[in-house]
Amino acid sequence: GIQVEQSPPDLILQEGANSTLRCNFSDSVNNLQWFHQNPWGQLINLFYIPSGTKQNGRLSATTVATERYSLLYISSSQTTDSGVYFCAVAPETGTASKLTFGTGTRLQVTL
Amino acid sequence: NAGVTQTPKFQVLKTGQSMTLQCAQDMNHEYMSWYRQDPGMGLRLIHYSVGAGITDQGEVPNGYNVSRSTTEDFPLRLLSAAPSQTSVYFCATLRRQGNSPLHFGNGTRLTVT
């Protein structure tokens, strides 16, 4: 099946710093989503982005489908950004609902 | 609007017991799925459904059973619980149309002793 690798696995930032999280995938996709899991365990969808660039406030994401990677940018980080960020993809040849998740990037934002 | 509701929130089982994790949605989404989350392993797909009456296996289906008799409900059954099934279980829904985000329930934390 499709492989998803996220980097870095762990990241510690001071409040106000910027960061870039990366998601590499091994096959063409028809669905790519980014999620934030907060410290209480809730999974929140950040972006649906199988290609192109999107922005939502301090967060933005870019997927370069031809090169099989996606980037999540967090600018001016805040302590509320702490948690785990997951990338999930579904291969072009399969159903869009059959998403495979990476193992995540754990982000800690300190004061 | 409740979204995706999972019950119970917490459950402790003894090895060999059976139980059903409930998932209900009120968004009329066609797709529903079950994931388990274990430390360091991200989320892994157990079973999924693209509509009422249709289910299929995901990456880790062994020891679990599902059915989808209505659009709203997608229960996950543990037939004979094992300690390896200790995990956090998430139900998720997705609209069949494009550009649709995956919506998660708040999870069920299951411990098997």
Image (tube, rainbow, N blue to C red):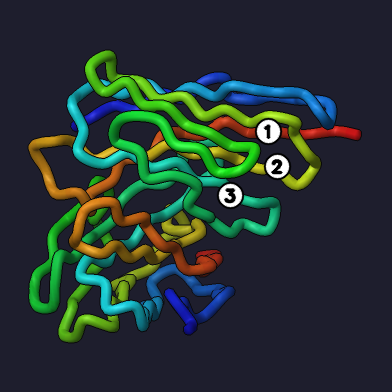
Q: Position of residue B44 (x, y in %)?
A: 36, 47
Residue A62 lies left or right of residue A12; in this view the side is left
Same chain assignment for discs 3 and 2: yes
Name the residue beneath numbered marker 3: A37
At mark 3, the secondary structure is: strand
> In this view of the protein, which residue sits in the foreground, A63 or B85?
A63
Query: Which amino acid is tagged 3?
Result: Gln
Q: Residue A19, position in %: x, y? A: 65, 22
Q: Mark 2 sits on what residue? A: A81
Q: Quadrant of residue B103?
A: bottom left
Residue A39 locus on image (x, y percent): 70, 52
Chain at tag 2: A
Marks 3 and 2, how far apart at CA: 10 Å
Q: Is residue A19 left or right of residue B36?
A: right
Q: Nearer the viewer, residue A111 or B17?
A: A111
Upstream in the sequence, badge 3 or badge 1?
Answer: 3
Q: Residues within 10 Å of mark 3 (few under 14, many from 20)?
A: some
Give me the residue at 18% from left, 65% from top.
Answer: B49
Residue bearing the label numbered 1? A107
Would residue A91 appear left or right of A48 to someone viewing this image? left
User: Given the image, on which type of amino acid does mark 2 rest?
Assistant: Asp
Labels 2 and 1 touching (C-beta < 8 A): yes
Residue name at image x 26 percent, y 23 percent: A65
Instruction: State the image quarter where residue B3 is shown.
Output: bottom left
Q: Residue furthest top?
A: A67
Disc number placed over residue B1 in the picture, else none: none
Q: Chain of mark 3?
A: A
SS of the residue under disc 2: helix
| Apparent side of residue B28 relative to residue B1 in the rendered image (left or right) | left
Quarter occupied by residue B85: bottom left
